[in-house]
């Protein structure tokens, strides 16, 4: 049992961080909803950014866990942390209507390329 826990420890940490990030995004949407009784442009941006992040979330979790269990835990966890960072920048950029949101959206879309080097030759850390 201890060996199994060592094999997924980093993946669990990244998953928990992603859940906390989701809660943070949901709180921002709820706060904006309560602040403005009518649907304002700010509310629409926050809601849309949250929806976009939630649409990709199941794919992110599935790919990270599959890569971590089948290939190598450390690179999969690192790629997961990078994805969370990019998703945070995307959310903030989308809320502020800055050009940063399009750059980070491109980075999110190309995130799958990060897991390509995790081939059969990759070994997990001891």
Image (cartoon, rainbow, N blue to C red):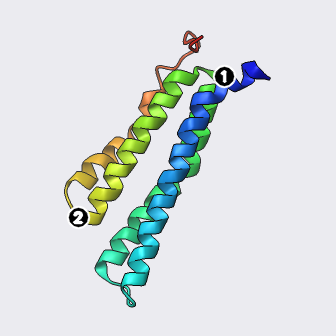
How many residues crowd around disc 1 within 10 Å: few (fewer than 14), some, or many (20 or more)? some
Q: Secondary structure at mark 1?
A: helix
Tell me which label, 1 or 2, sits earlier in the chain.
1
Q: Position of residue 89 (x, y in %)?
A: 31, 50
Helix, strand or loop at mark 2 = loop
Q: Is residue 52 visible?
A: yes
Residue 118: percent from left, percent from top: 51, 20
Give the camera-side residue of 117 and 38.
38
The residue closer to the viewer here, 29 or 121, is 29
Image coords of residue 26 (percent x, y): 48, 65
Residue appearing at x 74%, y 23% in the figure: 4
Residue drawn at (46%, 20%) of the image: 117
Residue 30 numbered mark, or none: none
Q: Position of residue 41 (x, y in %)?
A: 29, 79
Q: Could one spot residue 56 in this view of the protein?
A: no
| Residue 10 left/right relative to 107 | right
The residue shown at (33%, 41%) is: 107
21 to 39, vertically: above or below: above
**Which quadrant of the view contains residue 10?**
top right
**What residue is pinned by disc 2?**
97
- Count every numbered label the image shows and give the total: 2
Residue extending farthest bottom: 37
**The one of 85 and 20 positioned closer to us in this rendering:** 20
Which numbered circle lies on residue 7? 1
Which image quadrant: the C terminus?
top right
Badge 2: residue crowd in 10 Å (few <14, some 14–19, many ≥20):
few
Q: CA distance from mark 1 to mark 2?
A: 40 Å
């Amino acid at each position: 049992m201890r060996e199994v826990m060592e094999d997924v420890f980093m993946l669990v940490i990244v998953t928990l961080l992603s859940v906390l990030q989701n809660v943070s995004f949901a709180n921002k949407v709820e706060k904006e909803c309560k602040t403005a009784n009518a649907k304002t442009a700010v509310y629409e941006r926050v809601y849309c950014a949250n929806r976009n992040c939630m649409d990709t979330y199941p794919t992110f979790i599935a790919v990270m866990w599959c890569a971590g269990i089948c290939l190598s835990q450390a690179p999969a966890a690192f790629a997961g942390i990078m994805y969370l960072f990019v998703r945070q920048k995307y959310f903030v950029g989308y809320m502020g209507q800055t050009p940063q949101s399009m750059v980070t959206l491109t980075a999110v879309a190309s995130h799958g390329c990060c897991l390509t080097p995790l081939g059969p030759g990759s070994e997990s850390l001891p």
